[in-house]
C-alpha cells in the first residue's frame, strides 16, 4: 500500500481545511514547494496535491506553484482541483504532472471523462468525494443525488482505471477513516482505490491495508505531528 502525503494549496500557501470548510483553514507553510521537497526528503514515493482555489472556482488557480513543484520535486505528482477542461489536462501533463484527478466533471460530464481516458489512459484518476454517502462537487460546496458507489460504477463504464475516495466529514478531523464506506467501495468495483480522510494513526493505515486499498493519502496528521511519515511508510 502506498502512503501519499497531501499538499493542499490555497492563496499560494500550504493549508489544511477542516471537513472541506474553506472558512476553517490552518496555514502550515508559506512555501508549498518546500513542503513537497520535505516530504520527498522523508521518503515519500508520490505526492497528492490539491489546488483548493481551483476546486472552488473551476479553474486551476495556483499554476505557477504547481509548475515549480513539478520541476523541482523528483516524485510523481497527482493533482486535483478545478480541472474541468481537456486543454487544462493537456497542459498539466505537459508540465510534468503524472496524474490528474477529476471530481466535478465525473458527475457532470461523463463523456468528457470517457474521452480523456481514451487519450490519456492511466493518467486520469477520478476523485469521489462523499458526504453521508453522496458525492459532493465544486470544491465540496455543492451536493448531488449520486452515491459514491453509483459514481464509481459509472466511471468503470467510461474507462477510468483508478479512484480516490474521500469522506468529507472525516477529512482534516484526525478521527479515523470511514472504513465501512471504503470497504463498500472497494468491494463494488474492480479498480484500485486510494483512501483519504481522517487518517491519523499507523493502526488506521494497517486497517486500510487489510481492506485492500492501493494507497492512503495522509494530510493533517503529518502536519500536526500526530503521524510520522517515516513510521507511516513502514506500512506496506
Image: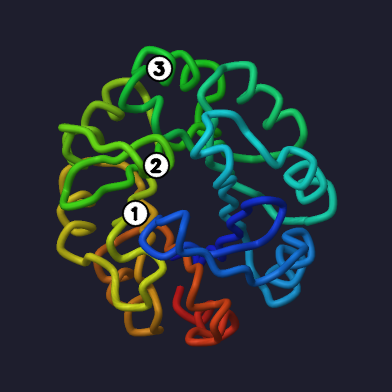
Mark before the other along the chain sequence, 1 or 3:
3
Tell me which corner region of the image, top left, top right, bottom left or bottom right, holds residue 39: bottom right
N-term mark: 3 or 2: 3
**Nearer the observer, 36 or 115:** 36
Between discs 2 and 1, the one toward the N terminus: 2
Question: Is 7 located above or below residue 157 in the figure?
Answer: below
Q: Give how far across and how far down residue 95 sits, in percent.
A: 77, 34
What is the tally of numbered marks visible in this picture? 3
- Depicted 106 relative to depicted 200: above or below: above
Is label 1 or label 3 in front? 1
Per the image, label 1 sits on a secondary structure element best described as strand
Taking the spot 46% from the left edge, 73% from the top edge, the residue there is 236
- Answer left or right for 144 relative to 200: left
Look at discs 3 and 2 and give the one toward the viewer: 2
Q: Is residue 86 left or right of residue 109?
A: right
3D distance between C-alphas at marks 3 and 2: 15 Å
Q: Confirm or deny contact between disc 3 and disc 2 (CB under 8 A).
A: no
The reply to whether dot 2 and dot 1 touch (C-beta < 8 Å) is: yes
- SS state under label 2: strand
Is 127 located above or below residue 82 in the figure? Answer: below
Q: Residue 125 placed where, x, y %? A: 46, 37
Q: What is the spatial separation of the Cα atoms under label 1 and label 3, in whole angstroms?
A: 22 Å
Residue at image mark 3: 114
Q: Position of residue 205 (x, y in %)?
A: 37, 75
Amino acid at each position: 500500500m502506498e502512503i501519499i502525503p497531501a499538499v493542499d494549496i490555497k492563496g499560494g500557501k500550504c493549508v489544511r481545511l477542516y471537513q472541506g470548510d474553506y472558512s476553517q483553514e490552518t496555514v502550515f507553510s508559506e512555501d508549498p514547494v518546500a513542503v513537497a521537497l520535505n516530504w520527498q526528503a522523508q521518503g515519500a514515493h508520490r505526492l497528492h496535491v490539491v489546488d483548493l482555489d481551483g476546486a472552488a472556482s473551476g479553474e486551476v488557480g495556483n499554476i505557477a506553484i504547481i509548475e515549480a513543484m513539478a520541476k523541482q520535486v523528483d516524485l510523481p505528482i497527482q493533482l486535483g482541483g478545478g480541472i474541468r477542461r481537456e486543454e487544462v489536462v493537456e497542459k498539466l501533463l505537459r508540465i510534468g504532472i503524472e496524474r490528474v484527478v477529476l471530481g466535478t466533471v465525473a458527475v457532470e460530464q461523463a463523456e468528457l471523462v470517457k474521452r480523456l481516458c481514451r487519450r490519456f489512459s492511466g493518467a486520469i484518476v477520478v476523485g469521489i468525494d462523499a458526504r453521508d454517502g453522496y458525492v459532493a462537487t465544486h470544491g465540496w460546496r455543492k451536493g448531488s443525488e449520486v452515491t459514491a458507489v453509483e459514481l464509481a460504477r459509472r466511471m468503470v463504464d467510461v474507462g477510468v482505471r483508478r479512484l480516490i475516495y474521500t469522506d468529507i466529514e472525516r477529512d482534516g478531523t484526525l478521527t479515523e477513516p470511514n472504513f465501512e464506506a471504503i470497504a463498500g467501495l472497494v468491494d463494488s468495483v474492480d479498480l484500485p482505490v486510494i483512501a483519504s480522510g481522517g487518517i491519523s494513526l499507523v493502526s488506521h493505515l494497517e486497517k486500510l491495508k487489510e481492506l485492500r486499498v492501493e494507497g492512503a493519502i495522509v494530510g493533517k496528521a503529518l502536519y500536526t505531528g500526530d503521524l510520522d511519515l517515516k513510521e507511516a511508510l513502514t506500512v506496506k
